[in-house]
């Protein structure tokens, strides 16, 4: 079964704690993305990576960090510096980051609640 | 930065009715995508459009890539209860692959 997996589905953390969200894909895609979704809003890009060992900030990178040590994995850390971390987090991947093969496919999401 | 205006924000229709929603932008995109999101799940790709003027169908769904490359619409014919969800348009920037999302259209279908 090919696809994108995110774990866990639901995550609860205390304020001030860092938390890492997992994203794995077995589609052999080069590019991976992290989005944040708030109620009634569209998706906003946090970070993206076009190739292993390289990543770029998206529109709302402050308070987040990522790594891309392996092609299939792109974990997102929500740090204590993120002022309003409670949200639905979505990971996506695409074969490349340009041209007709760059259609993005999404994982099932992780709902993070900071208490 | 680039923005997409998606309308309507929400729709409440009777089963069997046709639905139309659209997205406009001040920016030019090389690709337009339409996704559907069920509550608590990730968006699922419905239709991808790669050429200006392109009209593409997927079952009861039809989408078009505007000639100006600044707009797109999605039509759903003969709606059914499982069409309920949030529909997002997204424009893709060719140089980075980054997606710019509309705010979403929430569709509710009354049986």
Image (cartoon, rainbow, N blue to C red):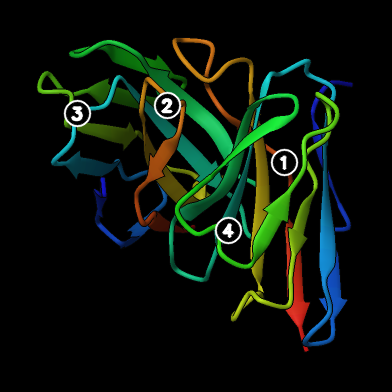
Q: Which residue is mark 4?
A: A36
* Residue A58 pos. (x, y %): 50, 48
Q: Which one is in front, A64 or B56? A: A64
Residue A8, image quadrant: bottom right
Residue A11, image quadrant: bottom right
Q: Which residue is mark 1?
A: A107
Q: Which residue is mark 2?
A: B60
Per the image, label 4 sits on a secondary structure element best described as strand
Chain under numbered label 4: A
Q: CA distance from mark 1 to mark 4?
A: 12 Å
Residue drawn where x is 34% and y is 49% of the image:
B102
Per the image, label 1 sits on a secondary structure element best described as loop
Q: Which residue is mark 3?
A: B28
Badge 1 vs badge 3, beta-carbon distance below 8 Å: no
* Residue B51 pos. (x, y %): 27, 10
Mark 4 or 2: the one toward you: 4
* Residue A46 pos. (x, y %): 56, 52
Q: Is residue B40 visible?
A: no
Q: CA distance from mark 2 to mark 1?
A: 25 Å
Badge 4 vs badge 2, beta-carbon distance below 8 Å: no
Q: CA distance from mark 1 to mark 3?
A: 27 Å
């Amino acid at each position: 079964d090919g696809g994108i997996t995110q774990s866990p589905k639901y995550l609860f953390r205390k304020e001030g704690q860092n938390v890492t969200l997992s994203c794995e894909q077995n589609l052999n895609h080069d590019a991976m993305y992290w989005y944040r979704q708030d109620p009634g809003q569209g998706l906003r890009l946090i970070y993206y990576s076009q190739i292993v060992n390289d990543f770029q900030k998206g529109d709302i990178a402050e308070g987040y960090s990522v790594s891309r040590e392996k092609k299939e994995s792109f974990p997102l850390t929500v740090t204590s510096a993120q002022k309003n971390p409670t949200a639905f987090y979505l990971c996506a991947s695409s074969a490349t980051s340009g041209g007709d093969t760059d259609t993005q496919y999404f994982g099932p999401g992780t709902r993070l609640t900071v208490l | 930065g680039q923005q997409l205006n998606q309308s309507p924000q929400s729709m409440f229709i009777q089963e069997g009715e046709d639905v139309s929603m659209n997205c406009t932008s001040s920016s030019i995109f090389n690709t337009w995508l339409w996704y559907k999101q069920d509550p608590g799940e990730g968006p699922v790709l419905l239709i991808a459009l790669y050429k200006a003027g392109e009209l593409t169908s997927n079952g009861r769904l039809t989408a078009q890539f505007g000639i100006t490359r600044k707009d797109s619409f999605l039509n759903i014919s003969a709606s059914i209860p499982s069409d309920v969800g949030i529909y997002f348009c997204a424009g893709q920037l060719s140089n980075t692959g980054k997606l710019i999302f509309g705010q979403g259209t929430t569709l509710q279908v009354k049986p």
